[in-house]
Amino acid sequence: MCDARDLDALCLAKSYFDLKEYDRAAYFLRGCRSQKAYFLYMYSRYLSGEKKKDDETVDSLGPLEKGQVRNEALRELRVELSKKHSAGELDGFALYLYGVVLRKLDLLKEAVEIFVAATHALPLHWGSWLELCNLITNIEMLKSLSLPECWVRDFFMAHMFTELQMIKEALQKYQSLMEAGFAKSTYIISQIAVAYHNIRDIDQALYLFNELREQDPFRIENMDTFSNLLYVRSMKPELSYLAHNLVEIDKYRVETCCVIGNYYSLRSQHEKAALYFQRALKLNPRCLGAWTLMGHEYMEMKNTSAAIQAYRHAIEVNKRDYRAWYGLGQTYEILKMPFYSLYYYRKAHQLRPNDSRMLVALGECYEKLSQQVEAKKCYWRAYSVGDVERMALLKLAKLHEQLNEFDDAAQCYIIYIQDIFSCGEQLEHAEVSTALRYLGQYYFKNKLYDEASLCAQRCCDYNDAREEGKALLRQISAVREQGEPSSTDLSVPCVFNPLSNNTTPVRRVSPLDLSSVTP
Amino acid sequence: MMTNGVVHANIFGIKDWVTPYKIAVLALLHEMSTTKPMALLDRRRLNKLILPLQQGPDLTLEQFLKIVEECCLRMVNAVKHRYASSLNKELFFKKNFILKTPEPLITFSLFLGLFMRQMLLAYNKLSFSQVYKLYKSLQQYCHRVQPELSALPTEDMELTSNEDPSAESDESQGPLSQKQAEYFLARQAYLLKNDENKAMSPAKLQDELNNILKFNPDFAEAHYLSYLNSIRVQDIYISTHSLLHYFDRLILSGGEGKSNGDEGYGRSLRYAVLNLATLHCRFGHYQQADLALQEAIRIAQEANDHVCLQHCLSWLYTLEQMKGSDSVVLTEDSVKIAAHFCLPYLASLGIQSLVQQGAKQGMPANKLLDALRGTDIMHWKQSLSELIEISLAQTTSIWRMYGKSTMARQQAQLLLNMNSLEPVNFSVQQNNTEAFAVALCHLAELHAEQGLYAVVSDIMKHLKQQFPPHTQHAKLWMLCDLKIQFEKAMNDGKYHLAEPHVTAISALNSTEGLYRKAQLLKALNQTTEASQILQQLQQQCEKSKDIEMTIRVMLASAELHWDSSGFATALPLLLQALALSRQHNLQSLTSETLLHLAFTQLMLGIPEQALVLVQDVLESVLAHGSLIDKGRALLLAARCQMALAGAAAQEHRLTALEQAVHTLDEAAVYFSQLDCKERMRDIHYLQARLHHTLGNISQRNKCSMLFRLLDQELPSSGMTVVSHL
């Protein structure tokens, strides 16, 4: 009945609201009693405050006042809403609005309570779930909340897992959702693609994004992530195609600007790239990715001070942005301050304990500071958590070599070669020859001539090591002619037995394994 | 707005803007300048008021009026009226307002004139909507406090009426303008440096800083203050974070700063690493500090920055010293290069550090004091007051080490009575440096030696107040306090009281703690344990080349030998100690060793030699020694006299014995001042025996009664008088 009586006012107000005349909408709704009208009334007041705040920012009294411009309506809204809330008169939407107001006033604890209540009152309103997601900082907090039993909850959990970098759990959730009938949802596909991006499974992510573009060709959301992937793979034509396409759809979107920025960056036109990232930031100053990317661009342009500032901004927006911390570390490393950058790398490592890149970077810093023990630990850990760039072992091996720990070095080289060959793809690893060369010499020294000659032969496959391989083969045959027996006894057991101390590789190898990894 | 990728936060260079509060201050200024007849006292009070009003954070109108009222009652109404009128008319800001201001009171070029002109300028820059906003906030400002102040119709005021009161309270601590924030930071930083007790409490200061940073994240200086603040509470995590954040921000502004382009930028990088090194130094992470320092040195070398390199070098030798290794060569280098590059501060610091090391290693005293005097002349010429303080404190320490208590006392007093050359800001004089702490600790110990415990407790109270327990130099007085209490407990024979002090001392200084433990065990007759500890200490001291402690340990070991009647075995130890102490000019230790030697000789049955030794050393002990030393020396002299008298012929004997009684009397004076009952008992016993021999019956009876009283009072009465110095 209320709804019927308020219908006219509501329609009028809705039209004003759609025209962004919020105050006007609120004025005509002030006497309405129905829940719907009440929400629209309050919501337009809220938005009107927000709009005024944005306008104020442009002509604030002084530069320092920039941060002080507030939405003046928030307090009144809070008072009114809290009165209604204690009387129990708020519906799901109004609860959501109440939560938003609380969050804007930095009353985070209360806001979480209200959002939980909102999800209970109206589980299908995704907005309250999303707001809740922004307020949850760790898994313990997530577990402590009592959320309504509803299918939306599964979406929320999956989203939350992605946010908290628990990718495996997230993928499981999404998979089960797809099996439950959401197989065609573009949202789920995009989320899975983002999840794969987060664990740096680039091929899977690329495949999914391509599929997504086919199903939803005018989508702009998440395309910045897609462009990141294309960038990493240096797929110039695809990236340029994507950029063209997005500009056609809407050129004033943050995602579009990021894509274009990435495109220019890939073409090494870093000034232009930085310009586009700046534009993205103008469109949305709280766009985290753009700050970090801009930092990367400045790094490319060797403008370290600007890069540092960009990264700092990114950290200000989100303290948990590991890429910005990592970028800061890199900047200082470029400035030849390895000790200084340790702090930043450590921060990044704290945020992503299982990311090998931070560990390798940490190891490199320690190596530069001649802290070999720490460096070794870092490299070994990087290998243990799954080294993406496959550099950790090589560096570890070289470190062992420097420290004259020949057995350990050989062991690392063996695992390295196995890794390279067993992953199937023929990456261009010039370092394989280094490893083979070292192994050849090592076996030769230990009089394991069969293995040595095998390694030497492999060496000959590589241009830079061919000569040395041949020389080694000659040496071996010379020694063999002298009739020295190859010692296959246990004089050099270390390579095949477990190594001492903490750098013990889990897998053990027999020398014959090498023959089986022929490319 | 964005050049070279750097966002310039302050486009127009305006650091201040017009707020309702500022207008109130202007109204006050105007009233002051126009009201001609005013009592001199009122005017003076108002004048004093203006600076804090102008620099402080924004107040509410109520607070503002209250402050003005306290100074000058008549002024309030006038200001109120003017302020209200500013609402009615077109805004208060009219050019003619400032032009009309009578010249002699407020000149344009001076402080207040500048403030007025700044306000005018800021006002003129406002756009229409900003002026409207200012007008509205002015209205609110008035109405929130005193609705009757303005008679304006207020239809839009209902907006504020339904605010909940809880929200209002947090608003009273309003945001600061950049200028106000700068004043705030400068003041707090100054207070932190000079007199921490007057600065805000760490938690509150951090709150304020967070507030400033929330409103203006680009305000890098606030990060630095946050670094200083968290160092105060020993929070490594936040202090590192703030320090790095500060330099990240500074690096940006460095490029456009005073120094040209790239140079300024690289400079702040170098100092960033150097600061990080000092941070780790301060927290005792020597390895980290070492790495950071190496990095700073490398970058500075690449950039050919000799000044920075010098700073690095002086930190390097400080670090080496802290790690306990020898750094004389490094320090000497540092002094030479610093002198070459005309860096007097660093050079002097280096010399002072050298003097300290030299004193420990037994360099000739005249050289050390000469070096200090040489640098002192330069300090006075260049007004380096901090170094003057350090040098005075160092002289105090050196004199005390040499055992010249009068000179030490004099130097300490000189330091404490000196007027600092630094300008006095915010009515706070710098007196919280390490130099002051050291001097005060020495004074406390010197007074304790003379048995003036009331004075000592006063000094300690002052120290506790000036250097609260969490601060950097607090450990100095803590150790000093514990030592004094330990000595007192030992002198009084209250060993159970001394025991907890030993544990506390070990926590602050392990070597000292071990030594005290050995002393305590010795006093408790646990000789085996004591000798074990002493041996351990001996090794430690040889390693660290701590001469003073080595000699003390030797003396203590010699005393252990006495306990087992091994007087002959104690002799070589004592002679070694004597040689060492003479070599290092340690006079008090020399005389102590001589007394020990004399006692040993007495026990070995050569009282003539012993008496000669005692008489030799008596003069310097009476001049410089502590009360207990004086008493002990006299007691020993008396005992020698007694022993000699026993062997002398009949006619000399009586006079010799009388002499001994006289000496004992003197010793008794010192011991009674210290309230040292055990010794008093010994003296009474000896005196009773002497009087008995001399035939003074009444005197004898009196002494024996005193002896009996004390003997009953004291717990154990093993005849310690035999094997005790």
Image: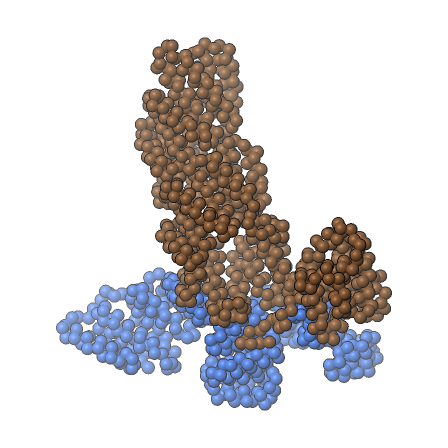
Chain colours: A blue, B brown
Query: Which of B534/A130 is in front?
Result: B534
Q: Is residue A106 visible?
A: no
Query: Which of A39/A174 is in front?
Result: A39
Residue B558 locus on image (x, y percent): 36, 31
Q: Is residue B103 above or below residue A66?
A: above
Q: Is residue A194 above or below residue B229?
A: below
Residue furthest left in the image: A482
Residue A198 locus on image (x, y percent): 51, 75
Q: Going by the image, does A94 lie left or right of B472? A: right
Which of the 4 image quarters holds residue A67?
bottom right
Query: Which of A368/A85 is in front?
Result: A368
Locate the N terminus of chain A by quadrant. bottom right
Query: Which of B456/B375 is in front?
Result: B375
Q: Name the residue at 70% across, 62% down.
A: B107
Residue A140 locus on image (x, y percent): 58, 64
Q: Going by the image, does B118 lie left or right of B282? A: right
Q: Is residue A416 visible?
A: yes
